[in-house]
Amino acid sequence: MDLATLTLSEIEQGWHTTATAYICNYCGQAFQQDQVFHLNDAFYPAAEMINRHIQSAHPDAINQLIQSSSKYNTLTAKQRDLLVAFSQGVKDATIAQDSHVAAATIRHQKFTFREKAKQAKLYLAIYNQVFNNPERDAPIALPPATQANGPIAITQRDYHQLLQKYFESGDQLRLKRWPKQQKAILAILKRVSLEIPTTQHFTEPAMNNRLVPIFGDYVRLRRYLIDYGFLARTPDGQDYWRLTFKE
């Protein structure tokens, strides 16, 4: 069993999937996905046959998992024995008697296993968010006008990093300074535009009132929002509104 390549679900169920077959983790037997299997005067698809195989050929699968010789199995011999007993439904009092310890010791060990499981869940959640989150590498949506001088893409990861760098922390959206890099400018404009409802039109003073708390040089901020296609205005500058574009 190659734990390095299997998912948590695949390890738990005892089999994994390739492009064409279901493969047993324990013995490697394969069931082709396009096959139908005849068993006991009935026909079964491969997805059901792999589960039947695990139940019949590996009834001690959980024990095999506990006793795995993988380098990733860091359980001590005593912990393995306890887990085997727990999996078999042996009562705490019986385990304590056989181990010559108090029943409270066995209950505490159960508590320890539960705590380790919680730690493992948190670790996996953190790991997946850091290393296996495709959304972080997905580009944010930008107006067509931002591509006038060549294609520019900003990933979700870049976007949030730039926001942390250029905006002050707190409930009030407040820009620390105006950036020089194009990506940072676009990230800032994208974030500021979200403060402007798409269902309303604004006079210039009303638009300024929305931008002044965000950045002292609100005139520059307003101009860039227009130039890059986040805002539009009438030729006389009396009416402003936020543009929508394909997200």
Image: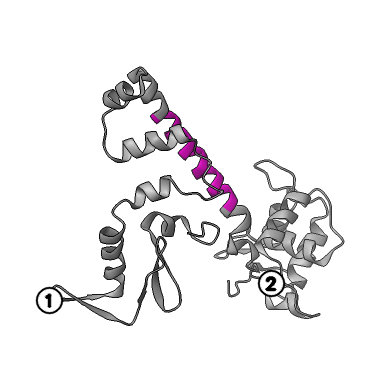
Residue 175 locus on image (x, y percent)? 77, 50
| Residue located beneath label 1 in the image | 41
Q: Residue 104 is drawn in which quadrant? A: top left
Secondary-structure class at tag 1: loop
Drawn side of residue 134 relative to residue 92, left or right: right
| Mark linked to residue 232 | 2
Is tag 2's residue or tag 1's residue first in the polypeptide sequence?
A: 1
Secondary-structure class at tag 2: strand
Q: Image height check: is 20 above or below 100?
A: below
Farthest residue toward the left?
Answer: 41
Q: What is the magenta range?
A: 110-127
* Residue 235 in view here: no
Drawn side of residue 215 relative to residue 26, left or right: right
Q: Residue 239 is drawn in which quadrant? A: bottom right
Label 2 crowd bin: few (<14), some (14–19), many (20+), radius 10 Å? some
Residue 71 locus on image (x, y percent)? 56, 48
Count every numbered label the image shows and give the total: 2
Q: CA distance from mark 2 to mark 1?
A: 72 Å
Name the residue located 55 percent from the left edge and 48 percent from the top edge: 72
Q: Image height check: is 209 above or below 92?
A: below
Q: Nearer the viewer, residue 193 or 33?
A: 33
Report the predominant secondary structure element of the magenta stretch. Answer: helix
